[in-house]
Image (tube, coloured by chain):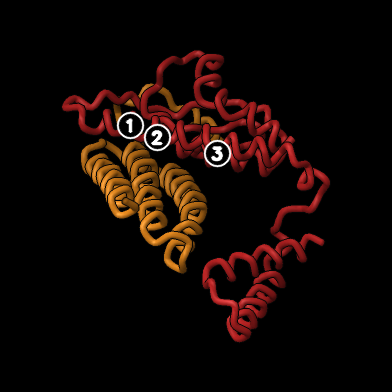
């Protein structure tokens, strides 16, 4: 029974990861690509880790998978913030169909 | 006090990670946790009375479930925009004012924003969050503040303030 549940959850995780990567290819600029890369890939990887926890229970493997979930949460969000801020400061333009840009006021004076 | 909490937390993580309560393993954990504490304890959270309020942990659990639900919704939303042939996106960076005062509260709010519907925090300057949004629904600050922050802010206030 555990095997079936964990296989289903890992399958869902792989599907989320797939859509994240599809977004990485299809979306138009750095900022939008990061959206797909952080959200879908993080949730997909969480599902895979959860599936591993269900399959192996609270053994060495399962507990490591469980500990990776908060670690991945902080790592991916902070990495996304660093990348998106870095690429803005580096001077990469927003996509030309973007509607607003409030952040440029911060950097105009410097 | 601050360093002691930091040290206990690190040793706890080490023991969970290795799941092996033999003497050499514990010794390695204690020594490495001590070295890390020596250098990084000054960046750790301050110990204060708030950490012993039980109701804050209760709200943290509730917040966890709400966050997970929002996260799944966010993924389905991004997935829809990615597989739609014409890609219905309308990106932009908006400026949002938050009413949270503590630093740790702001950090959690920023991380939550990054993980949920189509938004990534670009920068935090004082009380203002600069948020990249994949589909800008409206240009009225009152509406988009409510849409981006409204769901999380009231819970984070109960947890951290």
To which quarter of the image does residue B118 belong?
top left
Q: Separation of disc 3 and disc 1 at Cα?
A: 19 Å
Discs 3 and 2 lie in a common subunit: yes
Q: Write down the residue under mark 2.
A: B72
Q: Is residue B91 left or right of residue B16?
A: left
At label 2, counting other C-alpha atoms closer than 10 Å, the crowd grade (few under 14, some 14-19, many 20 or more) is some
B69 left or right of B45 in image: left
Q: CA distance from mark 3 to mark 2?
A: 12 Å
Chain letter of disc 3 in the image: B
Q: Residue, x 72% and y 64% (percent of image)? A: B41
Q: Relative to the observer, which residue lies in front, A8 or B95?
A: A8
Crowd class of label 3 (few under 14; some 14 to 19; many from 20; radius 10 Å): few
Q: Position of residue B102 (x, y in %)?
A: 72, 39
Disc 3 target residue:
B64
Mark number for residue B76?
A: 1
Q: Residue at point 19% right, 25% down?
A: B86
Query: Which chain's residue wears label 1?
Result: B
Q: Which chain is orange?
A: A
The reply to whether dot 3 and dot 2 touch (C-beta < 8 Å) is no
């Amino acid at each position: 029974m555990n095997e079936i549940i964990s296989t289903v959850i890992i399958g869902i995780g792989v599907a989320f990861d797939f859509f994240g990567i599809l977004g990485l290819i299809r979306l138009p600029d750095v900022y939008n690509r990061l959206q797909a890369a952080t959200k879908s890939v993080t949730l997909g990887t969480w599902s895979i880790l959860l599936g591993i926890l269900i399959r192996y229970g609270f053994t060495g493997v399962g507990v490591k998978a469980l500990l990776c979930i908060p670690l991945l949460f902080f790592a991916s969000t902070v990495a996304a913030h660093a990348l998106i801020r870095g690429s803005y400061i580096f001077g990469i333009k927003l996509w030309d169909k973007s509607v607003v840009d409030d952040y440029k006021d911060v950097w105009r004076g410097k | 006090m601050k360093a002691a909490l930091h040290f206990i937390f690190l040793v706890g993580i080490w023991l969970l990670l290795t799941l092996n309560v033999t003497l050499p393993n514990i010794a390695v954990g204690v020594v490495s946790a001590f070295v890390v504490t020596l250098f990084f304890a000054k960046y750790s959270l301050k110990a204060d009375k708030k950490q012993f309020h039980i109701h804050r942990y209760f709200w943290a659990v509730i917040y966890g479930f709400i966050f997970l639900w929002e996260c799944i919704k966010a993924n389905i939303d991004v997935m829809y925009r990615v597989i739609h042939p014409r890609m219905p996106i309308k990106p932009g960076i908006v400026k949002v004012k938050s009413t949270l005062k503590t630093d740790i509260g702001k950090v959690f709010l920023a991380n939550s924003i990054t993980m949920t519907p189509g938004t990534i925090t670009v920068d935090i300057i004082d009380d203002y969050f600069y948020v990249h949004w994949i589909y800008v629904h409206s240009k009225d600050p009152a509406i988009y503040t409510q849409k981006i922050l409204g769901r999380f802010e009231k819970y984070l206030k109960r947890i951290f303030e």
